[in-house]
Amino acid sequence: MTVLLGIAALLIVLWALHGFVKANPKGLAIGMRAAGGVAALAAAAFLAIRGQIQLAVPLGAAGLGLLGWLPWSALGLGPRTQKRTGQTSRVHSSFLEMTLDHDTGAMSGRVLAGRYQGVTLDALDLPSLLGLLKEIDEESRMLLAAYLDRRHPRWREHADGGAAAGKRHAARSSHMTEEEAYQILGVAPGASADEVSRAHRLLMKKLHPDQGGSTYLAARVNEAKDLLLRRHR
């Protein structure tokens, strides 16, 4: 009877957790998952004391999973399982929109204005991309240079001095907005300070100049982090 009551209590907790996840995934879900994990561990300890090890072990494992203390935790709690797949960063300039895949580091882009408006960068060959460099503003050149560094690492050998100007530092044409900062870091609006810092660390591993990344994009990622973290002070 005691075992059935324990299992029923756990099911009730998990059912409540499911409802709260739908209601507010940022706050209530974490608290309820933690409560469910603690309740499961307590029930497992009680069963173990009574000698019912066969039931205590899986219940304890479920509790550890809810708390995120196991690498295979299905609910993704805890620092070991908080990395999400499929995240992207988006950076805009007057002429370009660039997207960076967090998982692979692959970069893609689209032209927003000019004769190639609406065309993806992947659809343009190297001569066309070098021609585009001459037609866009300095900030957009910095962004396109970051893309070229990944797609054509030796592109500067084929560019004249004006087209290669993307190597220089570009002054920002306007202050970054919070919306831009969220897009650059690839986090949802209202993300916590921990989420912002974690996204920043992961991106810097891929973009830091010391790792062969882009000075310009690394600067934008740092700017986005600083802007969003100021909200939490």
Image: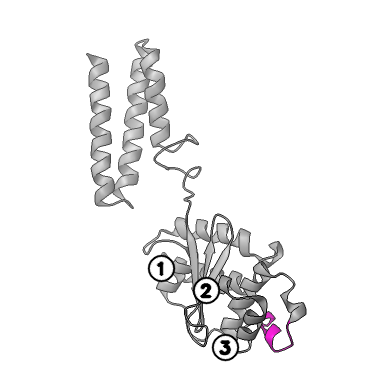
Q: Which residues are magenta?
A: 159-169
109 with respect to 52 (left or right): right
For label 1, the residue is: 231
Q: Which residue is mark 2?
A: 120
Q: Is residue 163 magenta?
A: yes
What is the number of the mark on residue 63? Answer: none
Q: Quadrant of residue 16?
A: top left
Local secondary structure at mark 2: loop
Give the label, 2 or 3, closer to the camera.
2
Residue 67 vs residue 83, the one in the foreground: 83
Report the quarter where the C terminus lies: bottom left
Above or below 64: residue 176: below
Query: Label 1: how many residues lie within 10 Å, few (<14), some (14-19) or many (20+)?
Result: few
In this view, the residue in front, 160 or 216, is 160
Q: Nearer the viewer, mark 1 or mark 3?
A: 3
Which amino acid does the dot numbered 2 rest on? Thr
Residue 57 drawn at (x, y percent) = 41, 20
- Which mark is in front, 2 or 1? 2
| Secondary element at image label 1 | loop
Q: How is the image coloured?
A: one colour
Q: Which mark is residue 137?
A: 3
- Distance CA(mark 1)–CA(mark 3): 31 Å
| Residue drawn at the location 23% of the way across and 25% of the way down | 8
- Label whose residue precedes the other's in the sequence (1 or 3): 3
Residue 224 vertical placement versus 198 (above, below):
below
What is the three-letter code of the residue carrying label 1? Arg
- Dot 2 or dot 1, earlier in sequence: 2
Q: Is residue 195 rendered magenta in the image?
A: no
Mark 2–mark 3 distance (CA, rounded to whole Å)? 18 Å
